[in-house]
Amino acid sequence: MTDFVKMHGCGNDFILLDGRKDDFSYLLADSGRLATLCDRRFGIGCDQFIVIGQGQSGADADMIIRNSDGSIAGMCGNAARCVASILMRESGQGSVTLSVGDRLLKANRTGDLVTIDMGLALSEGKADVGIEGLPIATTVDMGNPHTVFAVQNADDVDLAHIGPMIETHRLFPNKTNVEFISTLSNGIRMRVWERGAGITLACGSGACASALAAHRLGLAPSRMDVVMDGGTLILEIASDGRILMTGPATHVYRGTF
């Protein structure tokens, strides 16, 4: 029997396992079994599968991420807040450091909200996908790739149709996450198609990429709300380019499989 915790950040939900106590390398290597566990009809159901590991390079813990189809994910901002929340509750401390891949993320809690310093974008660029009606996109690498389209109204986009077309476009040999944003009085509206997961209610790294793109395009100030289908995150672009993300980390239940 394996213990797990179910959590979500703005509706972006996760199965979390504690790999500090047990070795789950066999499970992480089995994409088919992971996909079944993540399936909402035949398994537990989640957008991403998370294993908390022993911290590397001075971090309190590290985080290994798989998408709901079993594929490897490089970053997940909402899951990082959930893991940080677990670590802070365990330690009684108000801040922790989390390693994800080769990135070191600092987190702290203020009331019910967790703030993650997501660091700098690894790269920024432009991409013309050549699809009629779509503007030139802003590409942002947050440890995972994002392709952000600024449109008049993000809610008018047929995301289920256009999302997979962009995810698997020839310009992105490793696939990409896809975000559509439009301006609001207090920030931006964002909808997301996640690489390896499809439409999700929220995406933390996608919110970071979208906020950076919106700020670079002059569509939003350096501090803004990012309103997603599952809730709102507060994003701040610091003067040195670091991206700070603040939002909830909600415990749902504990269970075993």
Image: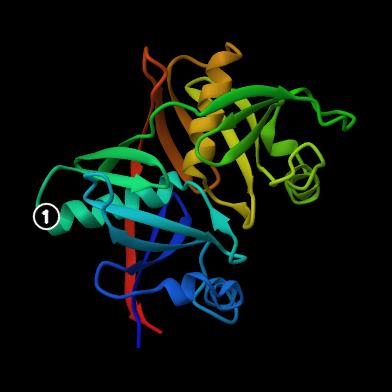
Describe residue 200's horizontal placement relative to residue 165 as left or right: left
Name the outermost residue toward the bottom: 1
- Residue 67, position as x, y percentages in the image: 56, 60
**Relative height, residue 8 to residue 36 (above, below):** above
Describe residue 90's horizontal placement relative to residue 204 as left or right: left
Q: State the residue in front, 185 or 5.
A: 5
Q: Please name the residue shown 63% across and 30% down the image.
A: 181
Q: Which quadrant of the view contains residue 198? A: bottom right
**Please, what secondary structure does the residue beneath circle 1 have?**
helix
Q: Which quadrant of the view contains residue 130? A: top right
Q: Quadrant of the N terminus?
A: bottom left
Q: Please name the residue shown 9% across and 52% down the image.
A: 92
Q: Can residue 70 be seen in this view?
A: yes
Name the outermost residue toward the front: 57
Describe residue 64's horizontal placement relative to residue 161 as left or right: left
- Residue 215, position as x, y percentages in the image: 53, 16
Q: State the residue in front, 139 or 178.
A: 139
Q: Is residue 249 visible?
A: no
Q: Please name the residue shown 60% across and 39% down the image.
A: 145
Q: Can you identify the residue that label 1 sits on?
A: 91
Q: In which quarter of the image is the C terminus?
A: bottom left
- Residue 243, position as x, y percentages in the image: 40, 27
Q: State the residue in front, 58 or 14.
A: 58
Describe residue 82's horizontal placement relative to residue 58 as left or right: right
Q: Residues within 10 Å of mark 1 (few under 14, many from 20)?
A: few
Q: State the residue in front, 103 or 228.
A: 103
